[in-house]
Amino acid sequence: MTLSQEQIDRYHEDGFLVLDSALDPREVESLREAFERDCETPGPQVVPEEGSNRVRAVYASHQRQPEYAGLVRDPRVLGAAKQLLSDDLYIYQFKINAKPALGGEKWSWHQDYVAWQIADNLPAPLQVNVAVFLDDVDEFNGPVIFLPGSHRSGLVQQSRKATAKSEQHLDPEDIALSGAQLTELVGRRGMVSPKGPAGSVVLFSPEIVHGSGPNMSPFARRLLIMTYNDSSNLPSWSGEPRPDHLVCRDTEPLRQLDTTFLAALQGAAA
Amino acid sequence: MTLSQEQIDRYHEDGFLVLDSALDPREVESLREAFERDCETPGPQVVPEEGSNRVRAVYASHQRQPEYAGLVRDPRVLGAAKQLLSDDLYIYQFKINAKPALGGEKWSWHQDYVAWQIADNLPAPLQVNVAVFLDDVDEFNGPVIFLPGSHRSGLVQQSRKATAKSEQHLDPEDIALSGAQLTELVGRRGMVSPKGPAGSVVLFSPEIVHGSGPNMSPFARRLLIMTYNDSSNLPSWSGEPRPDHLVCRDTEPLRQLDTTFLAALQGAAA
């Protein structure tokens, strides 16, 4: 899966790019199994829902599960990220959000890079997010909504609100855009929320304005987001750094696999 | 606008029926103006958003604004309701929900008739809801979501939760279906949320399970819901009745206009 010049242009124009059914059902199944396995590994990287023991999110699974270690190096994923960004990339953040059934609160409209600049002094927006649908995504289960082209507006809302509560794990509400800012951006090119079968991939800019509603369906909706960062663009902290499950410390450029992650795993097992 | 037999059958099969652009733009504009005017009438029928003076909902506007007095008697609306229900109908409840921009919390999955049975001892589900889009409705501004066919499942969740907070003005959360109940119903026929331009009309059963997400857009989304009730099926209260802006006391069968509400108004003004 090499991106065409048209796809690359569209990513830079819109701030996101959808690759329908980029992974096949067997691959999706292996990623789901690895997620279930990883949920059982105790540690701060497993974030439960408030007032529940159901899993809300798991971080840095690529450091523990071979399927995800392979996926971040899969030529279809790492290769595409390189085409959009630069040659030397590492995983800055890896998370699986399990938007729970009949819940999973909405995420306010925000730009990722604003959070990373505040929390990690990340020098420049030299990242690309690669989202993988681990479940079918439809209009009812809280799909991510993008404002196309908004990544070319600079940082719209740079500072945290006075009411900001979160410290290390920045809440999007703390850096949410105002109604006036949104009205202006939505007026230009509207809103778009990519949907599709499990295995679909959405590449998106760290500067694109996005948000999402709650999951109104009675089924969980698991979404993997891998954030690649240019390995010359490193975070730094004046005080306590964020935990290493939130901000990965291995900044060595990733070596691309020769084949897909599942083929590589099965080759290794043979 | 007489409903065809096919439309009537679909309503009874699905529990709802969509009439795209049933009202024309001039009519929609006159209804919006009447709403703005009605928001200025002080009284308990104007419900503000929590912690704000923005209007969240207005009740019983048909008792004050001639446009709405006409609309509830408009042959396209009252006529369709009669075809679906019975000949002698009156307005049991009339409300305009202004789902505010970037807010308007989600409504939990519920059946209207459960609330009316609890709050008003309404003997039978002999109602039809007529919803009119006063703004364009899309996937982003909190459209109502229906579970098709669920109105034929009886009352799924009949009693109020122990945690119920609301007294007279029943909160859908108090009678929300459980995850297991929803999984079963969604598994049968999925979820559907009608969208369309302002002026579209959705007729829906008092027993259909429905809910809605928040309004993620920076624009308000105004939705009018007129609930017709059979005039032989009257509410009664053992204690304090609900206020008359929530439950209309005029139970005389409505007389249908000969023409559309706007033509009738303009005729009256001529």
Image: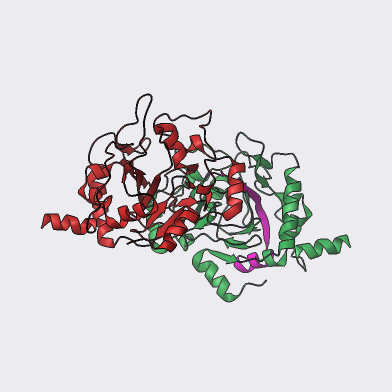
Chain colours: A green, B red
Which quadrant holds the N terminus of chain A? bottom right
Q: Can residue A248 be seen in this view?
A: yes
**Residue A213 sits inside the magenta stretch:** no
The picture places residue A154, in percent across and down from the top left corner, at: 46, 58
Q: Which residue appears farthest toward the top when viewing the image?
A: B239
The magenta span reads A78-105
Residue B124 in the image: state x and y as whole percent.
Answer: 43, 39
Image position, residue A268 (x, y; %): 86, 61
| Quadrant of res B171 | top left
Residue A161 visible (yes or no): no
The single residue placed furthest to the bottom in the displayed view is A5
Q: Which of A158 and B91 is in front in this view?
A: B91
Q: Could you say which is closer to the camera, residue A225 or residue B186?
A: B186
Is B261 placed left or right of B21 in the picture?
left
A103 inside magenta stretch: yes
In percent of width and height, residue A220 lies at 62, 48
Displayed quadrant of residue A103: top right
Name the residue located 31 percent from the left edge and 46 percent from the top edge: B88
